[in-house]
Image (cartoon, grey):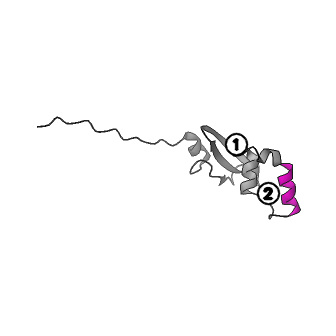
Amino acid sequence: MQPRLPRKAKRVATKDSRLTRAGVSGYNKPKRTPDHPTKSHVVVAKDGDQVKTIRFGQQGVSGSPEGTARNKSFKARHADNIAKGKMSAAYWADKVKW
């Protein structure tokens, strides 16, 4: 009779509490927040090992179609912050709403 070898422990992936709290399905996946008093969307942004919960967008306001004066004004006004990348609210507002 051979000695019994210990079973390998299964690695259980734990979901980040920030994802659960924000109610999103994964990193960098924005979600509407219709019940939030001021912000219209939330995303848990991840860039490398940095993770940050970002709320963005004004509740009740929609973006404008590409090429309109309102759309161009938003992009010009927030260009510096949009260029900062995934860890800025302006980046997500530009990507999702505008």
Q: Would you call the spot at circle 2 few (<14 residues within 10 Å), some (14-19), or many (20 or more)?
A: few
Q: Would you call the spot at circle 1 few (<14 residues within 10 Å), some (14-19), or many (20 or more)?
A: many
Q: Main secondary structure of the magenta part?
A: helix
Q: Give the spatial CA distance, label 1 vs label 2.
A: 22 Å
* Residue at the spot 42% in from the left edge and 42% down from the top edge: 12
64 on left or right of 29: right
Q: Where is residue 44? Give x, y as percent.
A: 63, 45
The answer to whether residue 3 is magenta is: no
Residues rendered magenta in the picture:
68-78
Q: Where is residue 56? Give x, y as percent.
A: 73, 48
What label does residue 61 carry, if any?
2
The kind of residue tagged 1 is Met
What label does residue 87 carry, if any?
1
72 on left or right of 14: right
Q: Where on the picture, by quarter, is residue 66?
A: bottom right
* Position of 38 relative to 51 (above/below): below
Quarter in which the C terminus is drawn = bottom right
The kind of residue tagged 2 is Val
Q: Where is residue 5? Give x, y as percent.
A: 23, 36
Q: Secondary structure at mark 2?
A: loop
The disc, 1 or 2, on the residue closer to the chain's N-terminal end is: 2
Report if residue 77 is visible in the image: yes
Report if residue 38 is visible in the image: no
What label does residue 58 carry, if any?
none
Q: Where on the picture, by quarter, is residue 6?
A: top left
